[in-house]
Amino acid sequence: MEKGDVAKVIHMRDDTLKGLPNTYELGWLNWTGPKGSLLGFSPISPTTGPDAIKQYNMVKRRFTEFGFDYIGTFIVGWRELHHIGWIATSVN
């Protein structure tokens, strides 16, 4: 990417997978207000379709139960599936 370009998800993942530190995800806090906060977590499961669906349904259900919007992504490791979830909220 050139300086001034708008980062897209593919650019963010490209940098992350290259091991380049970045703060792209902090942009998600812009919609929560000036005192936004971010909590991340990543349950791990086997790399199968049924396990990925089970993870998604479990995390999505808990987000909904507590009134949060679901923000998540899946990353496949060597032999494991990382389900990265983010809770973005405003501290007022």
Image (tube, helix red, strand yellow):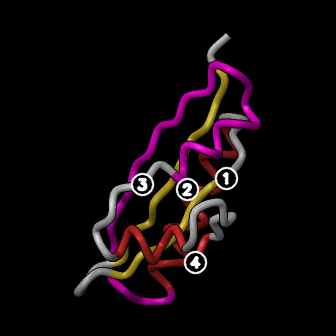
Q: Amino acid at mark 2?
A: Val
Is disc 2 placed on a helix, strand or loop? helix
Name the residue carrying label 4. Answer: 10
Question: Going from the N terminus, do you reach mark 1 or mark 2 first?
Answer: 2
Q: Is 68 left or right of 73, judged from the image as shown?
A: right
Comes first in the chain, label 1 or label 3: 3
Secondary structure of the residue carrying numbered label 1: loop
Q: Which residue appears farthest toward the top when viewing the image?
A: 92
- State left or right for residue 66 relative to residue 77: right
Instruction: Please state the extent of the stretch shown in magenta in the rendering.
Output: 24-49
Which image quadrant is residue 65 in? top right
Residue located beneath label 1 in the image: 70
| CA neighbours of label 1 inside 10 A, class few (<14), some (14 to 19), many (20+) | some
The answer for how far apart the CA atoms under marks 1 and 4 are is: 20 Å
Quick one: label 3 or label 2, which is nearer the N terminus? 3
Which quadrant is the C terminus positioned in?
Answer: top right
Residue 43, magenta (yes or no)? yes
Would you name the residue on which mark 3 appears?
A: 22
Question: What residue sits 69% from the left and 21% below the top?
Answer: 34
| Mark 1 vs mark 2, CA separation in Å | 8 Å
Reading the image, the residue beneath label 2 is 59
Which is more toward the observer, 19 or 73? 19
Outermost residue on the front side: it is 3
Query: Which residue corresponds to the image point at 34% horizontal and 56% vertical from the top-left?
Result: 21
* Residue 85 percent across, percent down from the top left: 51, 54
Q: Nearer the viewer, mark 3 or mark 2?
A: 3
Q: Position of residue 45 (x, y in %)?
A: 34, 73
Front-most of 30 and 68? Answer: 30
